[in-house]
Image: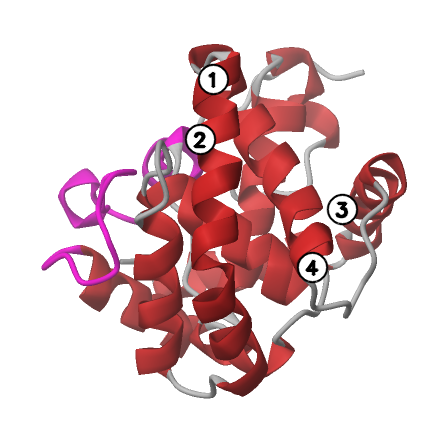
């Protein structure tokens, strides 16, 4: 793992944090989400886009209804941990509960908790214990574009935090930058810039990317 490249790249990315914040605010306005409001209805509103953007096309109406019903059943446990949790163990319990909801896997569970705790500041005392959700964009940027991490070091999207590869990886990220969930902004780069090679010249991490297009706007 090349810590220097990762530190430099995350510094560049965080200079544009207001852009990502604008998108989060737009999502909040669209779904009627309220920051710092811990109640069942508000947390369900945050769950909807987390499912829609990651697995929406793969789920039918009945499966979506089952997710919401299962979420309601587990909500008392979720509420308790968001209100009173204050350790890595509490965060891990919370993740296991959300991951146990029908049709929700480790990636959606971690993205959802990142949105709830980090973006909407519900249970924000747990921010230091959040870990980076791994998806194809994150892997592509770390392994191929920045070439800062060997492919064998990267966890899979389906790996839980407790997985033998994921835990040491996440702990290393937390030593490089805190909170480690800030690295999730690379997902934004993957979706907005890497999806079209014509945008390489204006990409936030162009100075560190090993595979950017030579085309200039």
Residue to which mark 1 is pinned? 62
- Along the polypeptide, which appears first: circle 4 or circle 1? 1
What is the basis of the colouring in this image? Answer: secondary structure
Residue at left 9%, top 59%? 164
- Nearer the camera: disc 1 or disc 3: 1
For the residues bearing labels 1 and 2, Cβ distance under 8 angstroms: yes
Q: Secondary structure at mark 1?
A: helix
* Residue range of the region highlighted in magenta in the rendering: 136-165
Q: Name the mark on residue 115.
A: none
| Residue that sits furthest to the left in the current view | 164
Q: Residues within 10 Å of mark 4 (few under 14, many from 20)?
A: some
Q: Residues within 10 Å of mark 1 (few under 14, many from 20)?
A: few
- Along the polypeptide, which appears first: circle 3 or circle 2? 3
- Along the polypeptide, which appears first: circle 3 or circle 4? 3
Residue to which mark 2 is pinned? 66
- Along the polypeptide, which appears first: circle 1 or circle 3? 3
Residue 13 lies in the magenta-colored region: no
For the residues bearing labels 3 and 4, Cβ distance under 8 angstroms: no
Residue to which mark 3 is pinned? 20
- Nearer the camera: disc 2 or disc 4: 2
- Alpha carbon separation for disc pair 3 and 4: 10 Å
Residue to which mark 4 is pinned? 119
Q: Nearer the viewer, residue 157 or 41?
A: 41
């Amino acid at each position: 793992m090349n810590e220097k490249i990762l530190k430099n790249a995350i510094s560049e990315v965080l200079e544009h944090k207001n852009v990502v914040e604008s998108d989060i605010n737009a999502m909040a306005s669209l779904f009627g989400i309220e920051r710092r409001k811990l109640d069942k209805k508000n947390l369900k509103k945050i769950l909807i886009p987390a499912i829609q953007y990651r697995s929406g096309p793969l789920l039918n109406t009945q499966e979506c209804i089952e997710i919401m019903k299962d979420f309601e059943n587990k909500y008392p446990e979720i509420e308790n941990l968001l209100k009173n949790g204050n350790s890595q163990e509490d965060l891990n319990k919370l993740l296991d509960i959300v991951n146990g909801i029908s049709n929700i896997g480790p990636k959606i569970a971690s993205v959802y908790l990142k949105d709830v705790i980090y973006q909407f500041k519900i249970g924000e005392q747990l921010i230091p214990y959040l870990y980076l959700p791994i998806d194809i964009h994150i892997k592509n940027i770390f392994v191929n574009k920045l070439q800062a991490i060997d492919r064998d070091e990267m966890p899979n999207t389906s790996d839980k935090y407790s997985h033998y590869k994921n835990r040491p990886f996440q702990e290393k990220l937390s030593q490089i930058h805190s909170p480690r969930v800030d690295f999730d902004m690379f997902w934004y780069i993957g979706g907005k810039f890497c999806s079209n090679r014509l945008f390489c010249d204006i990409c936030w991490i162009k100075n560190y990317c090993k595979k950017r297009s030579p085309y200039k706007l």
